[in-house]
Image (cartoon, grey):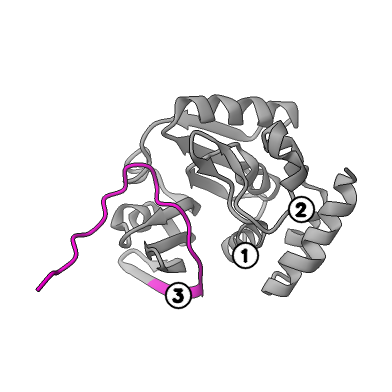
Amino acid sequence: MNFERARFNMVEQQIRPWEVLDRAVLDVLERAPRDAFVPREFRRLAYADIAVPIGDGETMLPPRVEGRLLQALRLDPESHVLEVGTGSGFLTYLLAQRAAHVTSVEINPALAELAKANLADQGVGNVTVEIGDGRRGWEAGTLYDAIAVGASVPVPEPAFEAQLAVGGRLFVVVGTAPAMEAMLVRRTGEEEWIRECMFETVLPPLHASETPKRFVL
């Protein structure tokens, strides 16, 4: 399979039409070896417009969501990033291309080790992969310029917002299927946040996320 051509088609047919127009973001996506982060049996689907399985019932984000996420966070070479949900490490790779350092937290030890191996194979050195539960943030008291949550949460999580530095940005998908929204949160002051709903989508929940109880008459 011609992965280079498939990557070009992914950018032109999936990502650009989804309003990802930041040239720096497109440059990263145009050269990112997504196929290297996909299990061998699914490699032919690496650039398809689907959530590719990566094992243990987990999936990668669809490419268009990855593009919107990366564009919304507006990373720069000084950015320190927290990622919750490492998966196979591909989104981690994308974040690392645009940031000074990425701390990525994965609750599944097997996936964490897979991501470490994948990132090492690509020569990525500005990432720390931690094994643990990042549902309530990570390393209390540490502030990040950007936070990317790679799965959905049923309701907004204040712990994520509290770990943003002033001027920082959080990307997270909030809600329960079939009604979920991708949300961008910007911290504009010590006690001030601006929340913006970007688009509708559906993502699997973070591992062990609590679903709010529904009111029943």
Residue at 55%, 46% (x, y): give it: 80
The C terminus - image quarter: bottom left
SS of the residue under disc 2: helix
Q: Within the magenta stretch, is there residue 211? A: yes
- Is 124 displayed left or right of 107 in the figure? right
Q: Position of residue 214 (x, y in %)?
A: 19, 65
Q: CA distance from mark 3 to mark 2?
A: 25 Å
Magenta stretch, residue numbers: 194-217
Q: Position of residue 28 (x, y in %)?
A: 76, 53
Tell me the residue that label 2 is attached to. 28
Amino acid type, label 2: Val
SS of the residue under disc 3: strand
Q: Residues within 10 Å of mark 1 (few under 14, many from 20)?
A: many
Q: Nearer the viewer, mark 1 or mark 3?
A: 1
Q: Nearer the viewer, residue 146 or 57?
A: 57
The tally of labels here is 3
Q: CA distance from mark 2 to mark 1?
A: 13 Å
Residue at 62%, 56% (x, y): give it: 62
The N terminus - image quarter: top right
Tell me the residue that label 3 is attached to. 196
Name the outermost residue toward the left: 217
* Marks 2 and 1 close (CB-CB < 8 Å): no
> Which mark is first along the chain, 3 or 1?
1
Amino acid type, label 3: Glu
- Is 68 displayed left or right of 121 in the figure? left
Tell me the residue that label 1 is attached to. 68
* Marks 1 and 3 close (CB-CB < 8 Å): no
Amino acid type, label 1: Arg
| Image quadrant where residue 54 sits | top right
SS of the residue under disc 1: helix
Q: CA distance from mark 1 to mark 3?
A: 13 Å
> Which mark is first along the chain, 1 or 2?
2
